[in-house]
Image: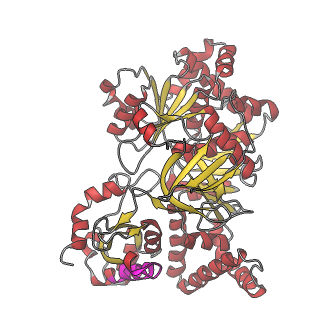
Amino acid sequence: MRRTVSVPPEITGGEALGLADAVWDNARRDPEAVQFRRPDPDARSWPHPSPDPSVVTCRQFRDDVLAVARGLLAAGVQPGARVALMSRTRYEWTLVDYALWAVGAVTVPVYDTSSAEQLAWILADSGAVGCVVETADHAALLAGVRDRLPELREVWGIDSGDLVRLAERGRAVDDAAVQRRRAAVSGADPATIVYTSGTTGRPKGCVLTHRNIHLDVANAVAALPELFNQAASTVLFLPLAHAFARMVQVGMVRTRATMVHSPNPRGVLQQLRRYRPTFVLAVPRVFEKAYTEARRQATDRHLGWLFAAADRVAARYSRALDTTSGPGTGLRLLRGLLDLLVYRKLRATFGGRCRVAVVGGAPLGERLGHFFRGAGLTALEGYGLTETSPALTANRPSAMRIGTVGRPLPGVEVAIADDGEILVRSDVVFQGYWNNSAATRETFTADGWFRTGDVGSLDDDGYLRITGRTKEILVTAEGKNIAPAPIEDQVRAHPLVSQSMLTGNGRPYVGALVTIDPQALTRWGDAHGRPHASVAQLREDPALRGEVQRAIDQANRSVSHAEAIKAFRILPDDFTEANGELTPTLKVRREAVQQQRAADIEALYDGR
């Protein structure tokens, strides 16, 4: 019998609601509320007549959306037409998104790092009639595949000023024409087709309706008022082509909170210090790097012992919060002292005001979860997929269990199948894959449950724990089923390690591919008499292998003998998005790694 947990919805309906309606509602209710702050506004891309062009009020945003929407009507964009949007996270992304929704069109996001082949596939499969690109390089990329896109009529460049010209083109269009289009949008209409970046196979287009997104965001806002309220603010640096970031965008607009677009992830720490958000959202890799950098800085100042103590105390304090008695007086005093010496400086890297972070895209792991909560920055893990709009479950500040992804959000029903797969039923689940009825049928059970492809369990209180993906579970030659993610997380805890990936399908034992963090290697090399040496030169170095072996040994202590890593191989270079081994949200594409690192994998098993 399936183990099932369901939470009744707090928000229902949405059949007649278009997502763009919130823009007009906000302008009417609180026109001067600051909806966006633009770090580096460019008048060529999109001008603002206000005295401070970096501030966008609710009224100004409505006027901007209306101007672009009129231009889209002048360009002949029809209801239901697909228009692609390829750009980094910036104000114009959100502007175009809502303008398309206002005229009943469908946004097709494309990651700004996509290859020409990926861009051609998404535009051809979706039948896009228009495409907004950010840079001249994007325009050139599209021009190279234009002959394969017979339905593509218009291309607009953000940096080249085409959005400004599009708005000028729409000056002759009456505002009432946009109003009629907006009023005609129903909750059942497609709002977007989001192509899964995918760790395997060709991307599939997930069709999400206005109602799917509205109900997901509305119920998440109701469940997490600490995050989504008019006094809240965040710096968004994740790509808006990702469903997780898109959900936050819609939530911020819905609640008239303030959002800062940060197009360059490398400069996000500067933006966090400048704008001091009340919460941040990120993938786990951001927290891993923040932890590693804090430890490195302490070590460089010969205070590694202090950081190690702070690490232990943060974990003890966090775990004590989950007990009935809570942290004792001595632990509270010690934690308070370390707050002055360590934790406060760590929080300052996130702006200083932030006490809550939302983590998605991959598991954070208990190690980092307890550390950051003990340090005063509670990382709320949640779970969802592009196909589910995306959020399904979430931990909350008042109800959280580290190591899980929380309980179902309102309106979501979660079940665990006999084989451990997580199944879902909800109005937030997508309608199906665009132009792919066979894949749509395969992803639903006979009785209508959505197959997530993830494996997990529900505890007695309804908290969901993710143990892996059905396609990622390793089955050794002896028939042992192994979920790789928790072990890989333990290996990555070592400051020298950047990525780790377990192998072992059909093999006699578990092996691991390990990549080295280049910055950490530079410091290690200087300290060990090997300055300027590359990973490729040092991958067989006994001292470096000894460091990695210590990481492996530490990870092995947390698992059974059958699950333990018996051999590892240091790779000469890191996994990157450019080489196709990471997704845009920094998840490892296991199939790509297996193909491209086949020789290294075979070497793990030669002669043993």
Does residue 397 sit above or below 340 in this rendering? above
Does residue 579 sit above or below 58 in this rendering? below
Q: Residue at x 45, y 32 (%)?
A: 434
- Answer whether residue 375 is visible to the viewer in this image: no
Q: Position of residue 535 (x, y in %)?
A: 30, 71
| Left or right for 493, reference 572 | right
- Dividing the picture into quadrants, the one containing residue 378 is bottom right
| Left or right for 261, reference 481 | right
Q: Look at the image and tell me in which quarter the C terminus lies.
A: bottom left
Q: Which secondary structure is most common in the magenta stretch?
A: helix
Q: Position of residue 49 (x, y in %)?
A: 68, 30
The residues colored magenta run 546-561
Q: In the image shown, does 51 or 418 lie closer to the viewer?
A: 418
| Residue 558 highlighted magenta (yes or no) | yes
- Find the residue positioned furthest to the left: 607
Q: Residue at x 64, y 34 (%)?
A: 211
- Dividing the picture into quadrants, the one containing residue 405 is bottom right
Q: In the image shown, does 12 or 37 lie closer to the viewer?
A: 12
